[in-house]
Image: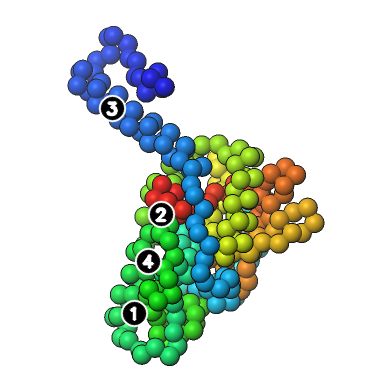
Amino acid sequence: MKDLFSLTLPSDHPAAPDDLCRTAGLWQLSLAFLVLIGLTGCAHQLPAPSNSRPYDWNKDRFSFANETVWTYDQTLSAPEKSGAQEKQSEAYTRRCFVMARAALQFRKFARFDPAAPRVSDAELARRVSQVASKPVWEPELAKEKKIVFPGSQDLYTFSRRHSSLLQQELGAGWPTYFRAGNMALPFPISRDHQQRTADEMREMIRNKQPVVLWLTRFPSLAINHSVLAYAVRSKGALLQFDVYDPNYTDSPKKLTYNPADKTFSFEKTFYFKGGPVTVRTVYWSHLQ
C-alpha cells in the first residue's frame, strides 16, 4: 500500500521541495479518500424493519415530477413525454435524488393527520425543512415522535395542496452532484455486487423499508438517475421491483433483476431507451 500513495518525480523536476510535498500530500489524500469510498460502499448494515404500513405508491409519493433537462445520449430514441410531463414546470429540475430521498424522509420522520389543527404556511415550511434536513440514514422515528402535517391524509395529497412550498423547502438539486457517494462512480461494479444489492433490496422491502437507488451506465451517459424501490415480486426466474420514479406522476416503473447473469435492467422511459443498468443503494450512511 505504501507504493500506492508514493509520488516519484525525476531529480531534475523544476518544482520546489515544498511544492512536491504539497502535491504528494494532495494525491495521498485524494487516493485515500477514493479507496475509503470504494471499500465502505460495500460495508453497511441494513436498517431495522419499519414500524409503518407498507409503502403505497398512490399515497407516499409527490404529486409533481422532477423535470429532467439532461440529454443523456443523443443517439437514444426516446418516446414523447406524457401530457402531465408537458405541463410540468421546467423550473423544477435536476431533483431526482432530492425527491427520492425526500419520499423516504417523509416516510421515516413525518406523519399526516387530517384531524390535527391547521397551521400557517410558514409553519408548514418550517416542518418540511425540518424533515428534509434530517439525515435519511437515521432510524425511523416512533409514530408519536414524527413531525405532524395537519389537514392532509398522505404525502400525495399534501403535495397537491402545497407543491410550491415543498419545491422551495426540499432543497436544491446541485448539492447532490457533490455527495460523498459520487466518488464511488469510477469503481467497477461486479456481478456479485449486483447480486448482493438485489438480495439486500428484497430483504429491505420485506421489512417495509423502501430503498433509494442510483441507476447508471458509467462510463456511458445513457442514464444517471435516482428512484425509490418499494415492492418486489417473482416473474418466472426474474425479480421485478416496483419503483417510484420522480420523473413520472402517472405510474410506477419496473426494475428487473436476472439472477442467471446477475444483472439489472430498467424499463423504457422518455429519458432512457431501456436496458441494462448498474444499481447502487444510496443514503444508508453519510458516505453513500
* Coordinates of residue 219 in the picture (x, y in percent): 55, 40
Q: Secondary structure at mark 3?
A: helix
Disc 4 residue type (three-letter): Ala
Would you name the residue on which mark 4 appears? 132
The reply to whether discs 4 and 3 touch (Cβ–Cβ < 8 Å) is no
| Pair 2/4: label in front | 4
For residue 185, above or below residue 53: above
Question: Which residue is at the far top?
Answer: 11
Disc 3 from disc 2: Cα separation: 27 Å
Residue drawn at (25%, 21%), measured in percent from left and top?
20
Q: Which residue is mark 3?
A: 25
Residue at image mark 2: 176
Helix, strand, or loop for circle 1? Answer: helix
Q: Marks 3 and 2: CB-CB under 8 Å? A: no
Does label 1 or label 2 sit earlier along the sequence? 1
What is the three-letter code of the residue carrying label 2?
Thr
Q: Which residue is mark 1?
A: 124
Structural distance between the alpha carbons of marks 3 and 1: 47 Å
Query: Where does the image place residue 117, in percent across and percent down from the top left?
Result: 36, 90
